[in-house]
């Protein structure tokens, strides 16, 4: 079941010795042709040097050829030296690939506050063998994710492949989300960037595992045109499908999670309010705990909605859990036992109708478990 | 160690049978003189009928004489009937006290979605004996708090007494914070309201247990003037001291908490940014987990700061934990063992200097423990 990258892309990885576990931790993703690209990165003010560098490259508007990623060290909060090390990593990757450094994006994930071991990266890069397959790259970018995250789609002959990592925790660190989508469709950079912003808003930005945004989050879309033009509307639908699948995988693999939560809000005054309401529910610690305990606690859903800022009338709003209507202006006479049973599932859907307008949106989360606390409290030292 | 209420106030409670445990659950707080009052209530859009009624009374500007509180039932999400029941509770209390209903504020906390048992309230009210002491009231308003919360201060002869409940959980419910401060100082209502807003912003609004805001939260300040005038500046310092003590008690008694976290942010561009930054740290699930595990994980503090929206330069910011400097633009060479030991305390202080300006502020939180998850997931059904 190897996933082939779109035409003109190659990828590979190696064990550079950055992860203490000795697992693969240095990866390259390369396009044979200069690629148009779009990019969204963390809003965190303590963003890592790689994020600052990526923003500058993005602003230049020049095409991109490659991404170099290391896992096991976020190169964040490493002072002025971190910026130097990040530049060095780009230069080394460019050297390895025969490119100029401005054609190479860097990404790092892992411990923060520890200087990046650039010498290990220098030694590792020549050892990376590039292939047309996604797996080695997808494996190497993981931290404590429990599984690799790969999704793909085909649109009118062009291919889209997405590779992501979710919320893994390495001490001392925070959950980092990295997502790389590559396609051989030919898309003008301006259209690519506008479309990507909208896709990211509706997918990756709607994932919430614990409300903390990493200093290193990024989501990249590269289009190298090796296949040719495709209808743009269908193309972005394909991109969104891949991004949404990755977003769900990331939420499902949240730390300590036993199940995926998908929250769908309809009838909001605006699409933005729908997304905000969905995020508030997916992010409520109280509701996430109830989800873990298979407790159809609609009161917590209602309270989270009330905190979201989205407009609604508590005397009209509808809440449906796993297809079972629980609330409509007041609690409905549902079977609590049956609703609890329905929550014992790999994926639980919360559907809310705010009955204010036409806005719809989704958010992706997971349950809050004792394991989340254990992973983040007891097993970090 | 009975706490005497300020001159002209009396309080009492009874077991009305609203709490399944049979503990005291219906309470009155009464002023012999019409009192100026100030009030802050939840912004939750699913706010309970008692909150809507309180806002209307507040807007009328008329003096207040009494508060009736029930615990064990939040009378929230109970449809149109909930509004009728809330009015009825006010009427019954007014009847008991020989007042008019508009002189009586209602407050409810407990399960939501279950109709308020008004007949139990009707039976219970005549049984309440009023005394000049705070304890019976403070006990009756609790839900699953582990201890009553009472604080007091004296300002130039006038007295201020505060009674609060924090984040207790009754199924299906959310954490509700109720705070009632009473004083015999004579303060014009307009000054009282302006001052109270500022105190609430700096104290109760800076408490975060799990980020969920209840549908029933309220904070009340009543001044009946039985003592007479006092210097206003000193008065509000006293009010803030009482409110801050209650805020700390509420945070310390957060569900499953083993310790209080006090976050102090200085050097912010504005006071508002300082408070926001402090709240972000106190509310970070990752940092709260590390706090539980006695892990001096400054990276999570930095990341939470980065998400707060407060302005700062990661290459300049300072982070001090329990008096131990951990970070200043880059990690400092601190003793991890010693810092971990210092975290084994009833109260842990995080001090952050953003080095942007003069803004300072505090927030109050607690650690995130496996017990939080257990209380909210496993023991609710």
Image (cartoon, coloured by chain):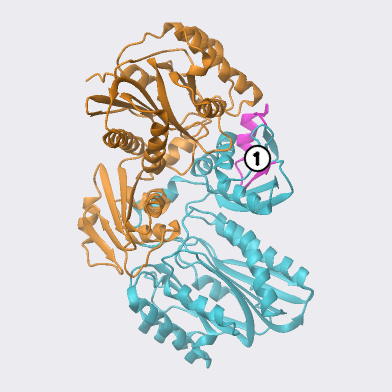
Chain colours: A orange, B cyan
Q: Is residue B33 magenta?
A: no
> Which residue does the image show at 23% across and 60% down from the upper left?
A325
Element on which disc 1 rests:
loop
| Relative depth, front residue between B321 and B196 | B196
Quarter placement of the N terminus of chain B: bottom right
- Span of residues in magenta: B329-354
Q: Is residue B159 above or below residue A53?
A: below
Quarter placement of the C terminus of chain B: bottom left
Q: Position of residue A87 (x, y in %)?
A: 57, 18
The residue at which mark 1 appears reads as B312
Q: Is residue B234 above or below residue A263?
A: below
Mark yes or no: residue B225 visible: yes
Quarter of the image for residue A133 reads top left
Q: Position of residue B42 (x, y in %)?
A: 50, 66
Count of numbered circles in the view: 1
| Relative depth, front residue between B27 and B185 | B185
Mark yes or no: residue A143 visible: no
| Relative depth, front residue between B347 and A306 | A306
Q: Position of residue B66 (x, y in %)?
A: 56, 83
Q: Position of residue B44 (x, y in %)?
A: 46, 63
Q: Is residue A290 above or below residue A169?
A: below
Q: Is residue B343 magenta?
A: yes
Q: Residue most toward the bottom?
A: B98
Binning the other alpha carbons within 10 Å of mark 1 as few (below 14), some (14 to 19) or many (20 upward) gives many
Q: Chain of mark 1?
A: B
> On the rendered structure, is A270 left or right of B178?
left
């Amino acid at each position: 079941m190897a996933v082939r990258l779109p035409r003109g892309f190659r990828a590979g990885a190696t064990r550079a010795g950055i992860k203490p576990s000795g697992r693969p931790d240095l990866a390259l993703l390369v396009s044979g042709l200069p690629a148009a690209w779009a990019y969204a990165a963390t809003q965190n003010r303590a963003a890592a040097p790689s994020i600052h560098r990526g923003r500058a490259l993005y602003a230049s508007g020049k095409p991109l050829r490659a991404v170099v990623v290391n896992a096991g060290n976020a190169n964040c909060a490493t002072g002025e030296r971190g910026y130097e090390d990040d530049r060095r990593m780009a230069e080394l990757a460019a050297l390895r690939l025969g490119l100029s450094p401005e054609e190479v994006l860097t990404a790092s994930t892992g411990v923060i506050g520890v200087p990046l071991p650039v010498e290990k990266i220098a030694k590792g890069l020549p050892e990376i063998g590039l292939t047309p397959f996604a797996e080695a790259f997808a494996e190497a970018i993981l931290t404590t994710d429990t599984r690799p995250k790969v999704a793909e789609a085909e649109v009118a002959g062009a291919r889209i492949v997405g590779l992501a990592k979710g919320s893994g925790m390495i001490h001392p660190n925070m959950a980092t989300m990295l997502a790389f989508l590559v396609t051989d469709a030919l898309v003008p950079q301006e259209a690519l960037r506008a479309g990507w912003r909208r896709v990211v808003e509706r997918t990756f930005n709607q994932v919430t595992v614990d409300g903390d945004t990493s200093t290193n989050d990024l989501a990249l879309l590269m289009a190298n045109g090796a296949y040719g033009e495709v209808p743009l509307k269908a193309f972005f639908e394909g991109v969104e499908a891949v991004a949404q699948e990755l977003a769900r995988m990331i939420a499902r693999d949240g730390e300590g999670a036993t199940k995926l939560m998908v929250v769908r809000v309809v009838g909001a005054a605006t699409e933005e309010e729908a997304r905000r309401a969905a995020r508030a529910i997916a992010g409520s610690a109280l509701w996430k705990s109830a989800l873990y305990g298979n407790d159809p606690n609609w009161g917590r859903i209602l309270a989270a909605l009330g905190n979201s800022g989205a407009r609604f009338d508590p005397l009209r709003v509808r809440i449906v859990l796993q297809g079972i209507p629980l609330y409509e202006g007041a609690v409905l006479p549902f079977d609590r036992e049956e609703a609890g049973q329905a929550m014992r599932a790999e994926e639980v859907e919360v559907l809310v109708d705010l009955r204010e307008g036409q806005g719809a949106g989704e958010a992706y989360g997971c349950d809050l478990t004792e394991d989340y606390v254990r992973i983040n409290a007891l097993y970090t030292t």
